[in-house]
Image (cartoon, helix red, strand yellow):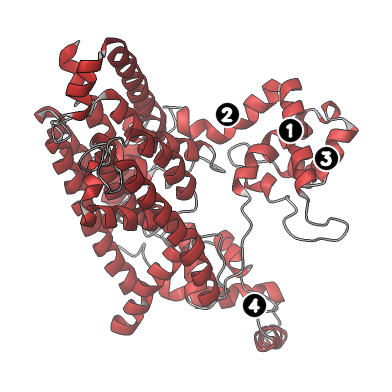
């Protein structure tokens, strides 16, 4: 598990109220397995084992689907072999398979979605004439959006490019059947409406979940202004300070700023009414954004420092990572104190009285009693580090190997540099293709052979948009955390293959 998963366990087990900070789709999915493990084997850890097995099988099947697809579109044999080796042995891929978290679950849906998305762009939407494909495509988009909050913008923005790539009618210019572009639009619209207007409110109502305000993106505003307030407070005028203090506690943000993550600064945002601080209005938010822009123009070096610190892991190839080898790190004293804070003092008078009475009878403070309570409640999930010594030795060896300046375990390689190289290549190919294209060539290559292998450059560029917006969402994250790019790790062979299967290459 990752730390967010344990917070979801607290909700699924009734220890804490449900809330929407983490997608309810994921929380309820995990709950199914935890409950199954309790019912069948008496422990939620058995449910985790079941989940891991199902996830491994699903990701293996999706990876095989990806490899079959890039073979279909004409990828060279060496690229197929390299893709197979990468998906079967790469640490960034294999190490994530056993993770019970929203990013790995999201990848189960995002991976086949990316393949069908690419095929929609390649065939200019003709593949959606097949009703089963259109239904599966819509369901995958729905699941991807429901399983990760940032996926809505990723699917929406990349979907615009996909729709633009879809041209031509079903049969002829006078056909009454829906056009390919309309079919693509309908799939996108149905998926978004189902996820946002149907699933989200129904799931929140069924679980009585508390609404969690979206604050993470505001970290792009709060982090640099807090950096300026920390390093050069005199650079902020009174009017700018008033505008910023209307939406956040600027002094607290400056005092608690963490260079590598924005959590400490966006946590100071006023998202609910507080004494002397009502919820900011739209006008106050706009004024704060204007102050942010003014400060950025006057203090560019401070803004570069702020953004570089948070995003360093995405672009610096010298920073690598290693996945945890068990979940017991989540039960250290510091983490237990964090989980204990989730025990709501007002979550029922009975609970509060029982906690207070137990604390007074045992001579413990309320905080100590809460720690003991949360440790007891989480005990069924502990013990994942209890392995034979030889396993500890092997895992320690792997952990040291991947962190010993290993360039293949740097997130920047997969998140920035390979995608950037692909983007430059596709842009160059698209420009060359447009310069050389003639009307008769467009008819021959652009419309005639929808079943032909490979992409024309503009189609590849439209499909590449899915990767672009996924990467941009990572750069907007509150920190460069290695869980976040799991969908990128798995789908990268697909986007690499597109650059080697361009149909117009023979014309140059």
Residue closer to the observer: 230 or 80: 80
Distance between mark 1 and mark 3 Cα atoms: 9 Å
Vertical order, 140 against 439 (above or below): below
Tell which residue pokes out farthest to the left in this image. 77
- Image quarter in which the N terminus is found: bottom left
- Tell me the number on the disc at residue 369: 4
- Label 3 belongs to which residue? 243
Mark 1 or 3, nearer chain start? 3
- Image quarter in which the C terminus is found: top left
- Label 2 belongs to which residue? 308
Tell which residue pokes out farthest to the front in this image. 174
The local crowd at label 3, few if under 14, some if 14 to 19, many if 20 or more residues have their Cα within 10 Å, is many
Percent coordinates x, y for residue 312 in the rendering: 52, 31
Residue closer to the observer: 378 or 5: 5
Marks 2 & 4, CB-CB < 8 Å contact: no
Viewer can see residue 390: no
């Amino acid at each position: 598990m990752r730390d967010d998963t344990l917070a979801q366990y607290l909700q699924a087990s009734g220890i804490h109220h449900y809330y929407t900070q983490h997608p309810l789709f994921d929380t309820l999915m995990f709950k199914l397995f935890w409950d199954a493990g309790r019912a069948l084997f008496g422990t939620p850890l058995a449910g985790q084992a079941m989940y891991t097995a199902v996830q491994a099988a699903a990701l293996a099947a999706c990876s095989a689907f990806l490899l079959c697809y890039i073979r279909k579109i004409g990828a060279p044999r060496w690229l197929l072999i390299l893709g197979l080796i990468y998906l079967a042995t790469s640490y960034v891929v294999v190490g994530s398979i056993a993770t019970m978290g929203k990013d790995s679950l999201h990848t189960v849906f995002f991976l086949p979605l990316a393949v069908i998305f690419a095929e929609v762009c390649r065939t200019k939407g003709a593949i959606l004439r097949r009703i089963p494909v259109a239904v599966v495509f819509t369901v995958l988009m729905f699941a991807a959006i429901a399983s990760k909050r940032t996926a809505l913008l990723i699917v929406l923005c990349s979907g615009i490019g996909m729709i633009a790539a879809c041209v031509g009618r079903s049969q002829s210019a006078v056909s009454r059947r829906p056009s390919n572009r309309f079919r693509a639009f309908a799939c996108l619209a149905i998926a978004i409406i189902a996820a946002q207007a149907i699933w989200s409110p129904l799931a929140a109502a069924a679980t009585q979940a508390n609404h969690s305000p979206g604050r993470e993106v505001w970290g792009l505003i709060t982090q640099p202004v807090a950096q300026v307030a920390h390093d050069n407070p005199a650079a902020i005028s009174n009017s700018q300070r008033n505008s910023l203090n209307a939406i956040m506690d600027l002094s607290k943000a400056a005092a608690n700023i963490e260079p590598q993550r924005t959590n400490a600064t966006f946590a100071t945002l006023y998202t609910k009414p507080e004494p002397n601080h009502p919820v900011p209005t739209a006008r106050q938010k706009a004024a704060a954004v204007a102050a942010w822009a003014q400060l950025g123009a006057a203090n560019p070096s401070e803004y570069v420092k702020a953004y570089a610190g948070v995003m360093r892991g995405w672009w610096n190839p010298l920073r690598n990572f290693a996945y945890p080898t068990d979940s017991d790190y989540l039960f250290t004293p510091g983490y237990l104190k964090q989980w204990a804070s989730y025990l709501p003092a007002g979550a029922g008078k009975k609970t509060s009285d029982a906690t207070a009475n137990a604390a007074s009878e045992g001579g413990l403070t309320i905080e100590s009693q809460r720690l003991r309570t949360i440790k007891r409640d989480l005990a069924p999930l502990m013990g994942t580090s209890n392995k034979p010594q030889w396993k500890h030795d092997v895992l320690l060896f792997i952990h040291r190997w991947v962190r010993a300046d290993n360039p293949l375990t740097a997130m920047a390689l997969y998140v920035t540099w390979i995608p950037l190289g692909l983007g430059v290549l596709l842009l160059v190919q698209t420009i060359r293709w447009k310069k050389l294209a003639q009307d008769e060539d467009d008819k021959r290559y652009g419309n005639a052979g929808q079943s032909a292998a490979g992409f024309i450059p503009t189609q590849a560029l439209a499909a590449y948009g899915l990767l672009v917006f996924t990467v941009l969402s990572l750069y907007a994250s509150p920190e460069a955390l290695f869980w976040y790019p799991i969908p990128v790790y798995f789908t990268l062979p697909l986007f690499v293959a597109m650059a080697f299967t361009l149909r117009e290459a023979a014309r140059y």
